[in-house]
Amino acid sequence: MSKSEFILINISGHDKPGLTSALTAILAKHDAQVLDIGQADIHHMLSLGILFKTTSERSGEIMKELFFKATEMGVEIRYTPISEPDYCDWVSRQGKNRYIITILGRETTAKQISAVAGVIAKQGLNIDAIKRLTGRIPLTDGETETRKSCIEFSVRGTPSDKDAMQSEFMKLSNELSFDISMQEDNIYRRCRRLICFDMDSTLIETECIDQLAERAGVGDKVRAITESAMRGEIDFKESFTQRVALLKGLDASVMKEIAESLPITEGLDRMMTVLKRTGYKVAILSGGFTYFGNYLKSLYGFDYVYANELEIGEDGKLTGRYLGDVVDGKRKAELLRLLAQVENVNIAQTIAVGDGANDLPMLQTAGLGIAFHAKPKVKATAQQSISTIGLDGVLYFLGFKDSFIE
């Protein structure tokens, strides 16, 4: 009775059409069973690995034919025998935890990659695959302020201390100026369906209440209260009531003027185009005002807008009061859960993006919470953050590649 043999072949060299077909045709000819296969191509240089099972009677002929074919096609081939116990041990590990670690920035440096890989190794995890999500950078590209670079690690195993690993990643991201995300690679990570955004200082690069305050001549007073609230120093509802009261007497018509000149955050248009095209439901959950949220909805196609309604008197001026309940941090988290129920998605399939202390409850409630150009307190608490590029960085944390997006 023939004995089974397990053989790993590694092929490297200049890539060319038909190479994989020619090599696997030899395996097919001898009824070899392919147990695993993987291929990568970097600058036209191929790295192909195939693990196959055959019999001791056929292995010699297979390796001879593979060698001749590889030589004919100008590539190198290396053989590694795998013992049956080693193979069985390798199979047994496939049910272990898997994580996706994404590093993102204007550019990716060897120092950043080395530091992240070092943390992965220290935690006892093994890197299974590394791939680039962003497009190749041309040598003539001098516009570093708009450049994006993203690399994704697929790792396997159980961290010895997951919280410490996450903390170390966030520390490195601050020291080496890059963004990082660590997500469990499960079914929910692959099928997120609902994404909720804060508005002010997230979708737009301003606080609308500050813009209104400038028109009302109380800019400094309102801005001081806003900054204190965003840092978490005072209760959001209390600060909101104080700020709105200062707007009393302002003509409501200025809201149209402000809306039409809102500074839109980098990457918003690209991000929304992709999210809508791929079927995501997208919401604005804002401690700002419905007028500006609805304006953005009309421009970009948001599905939901929940914000605060300013009361307007019969004279067309703001009364200094608001209508209904304040959309504060607690309410944002409640709305996130409500929208998940309405859209019939598991809370693990939701994403939240925001920058302020009042966004923390929804960031912690969502399956994926992303602190975007956030205040220090928020960034220190969040599991993921984006501080180096625009809103379209969210797409990379979801696993989109530039080649697919474009």
Image (tube, grey):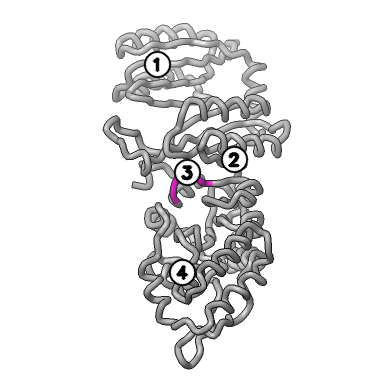
Local SS, label 3: loop
Residue type indicated by callout 2:
Met
At 36% across and 67% down in the image, what residue appears? 261
Considering the numbered disc 1 on the image, is that residue within a helix, a strand or a loop?
strand
Q: Earlier in the sequence, mark 3 or mark 1?
A: 1
Of labels 2 and 3, earlier in sequence is: 2
Crowd tier of the residue under label 4, counting other residues whose Cα lies within 10 Å: few below 14, some 14–19, many 20 or above: some
Which residue bears the numbered disc 2?
182
Q: Amino acid at mark 1?
A: Ser
User: Which region shows up in magenta?
Assistant: 386-390
**Which residue does the numbered mark 1 point to in the structure image?**
12
Density class for disc 1 (Cα within 10 Å; few <14, some 14-19, many ≥20) is some
Measured along the vertical axis of the image, is residue 306 above or below residue 357? below
Q: Which residue is mark 4?
A: 211
**Mark 3–mark 1 distance (CA, rounded to whole Å):** 36 Å
Q: Quadrant of the N terminus?
A: top right
Judged from this view, the residue extending furthest toward the left is: 140
Q: Position of residue 390 (x, y in %)?
A: 44, 49
Of the numbered discs 4 and 2, the one sitting upstream in the chain is: 2
The span from disc 2 to disc 1 (Cα, nearest Å) is 31 Å
How far apart in space, not on screen, are marks 1 and 4 (Cα)? 60 Å
